[in-house]
Image (cartoon, grey):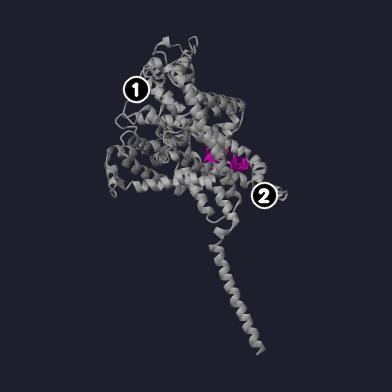
Amino acid sequence: MNLKKYIDTAVFFVLISTVAIIWSAPFLWMITASFRPQTFGGLDMASLWPNFIPTIENYRMAWESAEFVLYYINTIIIVSGILVVQLVTITLAAYTFARLDFPFKTVLFYLFLLQLMIVPPILIVPNLKTMVTLGLYDTLIGVMAPYFASAFGTFLLRQTFKSIPRDFEDAALIDGCSWFQVLRYVLIPLAKPALIAFSIVSVVAHWNEYLWPLMVTDSPGKRTLTIGLASFTRGAEGASEWGLIAAGTMFVMLPLMIVFFAFQKQFVNSFMFSGIK
Amino acid sequence: MMVDACHLWLAMRKVKYMADNVTARGKKRLLKPFYNAGYIKAWLYLAPALLFLILFTYYPMVQVLWDSFFLKEYGAEKKLFVAFDNYRRLFADEDFITAVKNNLIYAIGTVIPSIVIGFGFALSLTQSSRFKNCIRSLLFFPTLVPLVAAAALWIFIYFPGIGLLDYYLAKLGIQSTDWLGDPDIALYSLMILTIWKNAGFYMLFFIAGLQGIGEEYYEAASLEGAGWWQKLRYVTLPLLAPTSAFVFVIALIHVFTHVDHVIVMTLGGPMGSTNLVLYYIYQNAHEFNDLAKATTATVLSVMVLLAISFFSIRTMERGIHYES
């Protein structure tokens, strides 16, 4: 009986590890290929085994052949710009839906929720037109603007605010706090886990975004990391350039990768938060 | 006399009371929304979020619908009202019909497998341990990666002859395949990429759902003599129904709103075999300059998403604050 249990456990470990290795194969290949010397030729490119002396030549060449510094700066501006505005709009809206009473509250709330389904990517055509009208075509603000309001964030935060007992606020109000002080010193500190979860999900989503920035920007100076990588990939064709592409892909993924493996638990919990809390 | 006066007074009071009541109620209905300071405050706080939602969600929805009834010929000054002509043009466009068909195959072929695989992962990894957490992170990692980066890696995986897939299949004696170049295979190749990328994401929701099921249910089932399969069938699955519904909806939305890999890997080809509706919209707007078609296809996409929302908004609401 005991033996059977051991075998079962062993089989489970072997199986799940195999699946995890297969699942990670693309990344394993990326890491190996990015350190492989160019002279190796195409035929053995697919080998996952690092049977060579690692070189950072691919990284140097990739860095030089595309303007990664510019892409990083643009992406960081976009991601942080979106997040800052979102935090303001969702906090105010969430507070209103959680604590205040006003006509059409339910209707309005469902109208907000609509953005969970009618997500901005589906509206690229009309939004592009709006950006042209507003004079925001080919600007970083144009890339950010459709995401300034977030139904998901509003919703997540409203739930969190609702779970905080009103006694805390009442006590603060009796002490003479204004609503802003209540929000700043009572509600926001207590809602920190939700705010962090939302921030992680938002940053990841917009770091990875491709279609909308591609549509709304035109000049090379406004390109983001994902756009840079896509044109980089299309530019490099022959088999010998796969090391370069792997290195370029690494540049795009590396920041999120480092943060993810440093704060794994926080990340995983945030994405869980994004669905079920 | 005295009694009559008294009655009259009482009657008058009653009438006045009723009249007061009516106006009070009327006032409450009509005037309060505009005069109550609390309401003004509420609208003020909602204003920033509402402004952006109106600009980039509600107005564009109305705008595309309106625009879909007009056509502006290339070089023409004014746009012409053409009623349903754009819709007729759209449905006569074979590329569009192909894109819709492809999207349906893509939807069925990615939503169900990625949910089933995600659920399977969750079942094996629910209990926390150092080892399992590590595996969880590895399986979840593809979700974090930009779709563009994933596509770049998978181009090489699918590279005929020397790519990762063919390289290892050759060792098993399987001949090389043109994974992205064969019109019969290309769409399925993209589907595998999508499944790989999303299964780990859905796994997280199922893990959260599974952890929410009390141990007592399984104990009760064990006492009744239920086996592994029966516990899954009669305890786990029914209790996970809200989670599954929620995951199903986000998977469905994903299918209609992500085409980055199509742009990077295949550009809709070969022979339109990987064209999806959003890619069709992008292509018509960005390359073919046929805005009317792009607009009309957007209207139809929005309608599909609205239909999904109509049936699932409660699911989404429940899903997002499940347990809280």
Residue A83 vs residue B220, the one in the foreground: A83
Residue B289 vs residue A165, the one in the foreground: B289
Question: Which residue is tagged 2?
Answer: A166
Q: What is the span of residues highlighted in magenta in the rendered image?
A: B209-238
Q: CA distance from mark 2 to mark 1?
A: 64 Å
Q: Height in image: B165 above or below A183?
A: above
Find residue A90 and name its label. none
Residue A172 vs residue B233, the one in the foreground: A172
Q: Residues within 10 Å of mark 1 (few under 14, many from 20)?
A: some
Q: Is residue A214 left or right of residue B92?
A: right
Question: Which residue is tagged 1?
Answer: B177
Which element type, helix, strand or loop, lies under badge 2?
A: helix
Quadrant for the C terminus of chain B in the image: top right
Tag 1, which chain? B
Q: Amino acid at mark 2?
A: Arg
Q: Is residue A23 visible?
A: no
Q: Residues within 10 Å of mark 2 (few under 14, many from 20)?
A: few
Which residue does the image show at 67% across and 43% down from the upper left? A186
Which residue does the image show at 62% across and 78% down from the upper left? B13
Which corner quadrant of the image does residue B277 belong to?
top left
Q: Is residue B22 left or right of residue B303?
A: right
- Residue A240 horizontal/vertical position (percent): 39, 14
Which element type, helix, strand or loop, lies under badge 1?
A: loop
- Residue A19 horizontal/vertical position (percent): 50, 26
Q: Is residue B298 left or right of residue B12?
A: left
Which residue does the image show at 42% across and 29% down from the upper left? B193
Tag 2, which chain? A
Quadrant for the N terminus of chain B in the image: bottom right
Main SS of the magenta segment? helix
Q: Amino acid at mark 1?
A: Thr
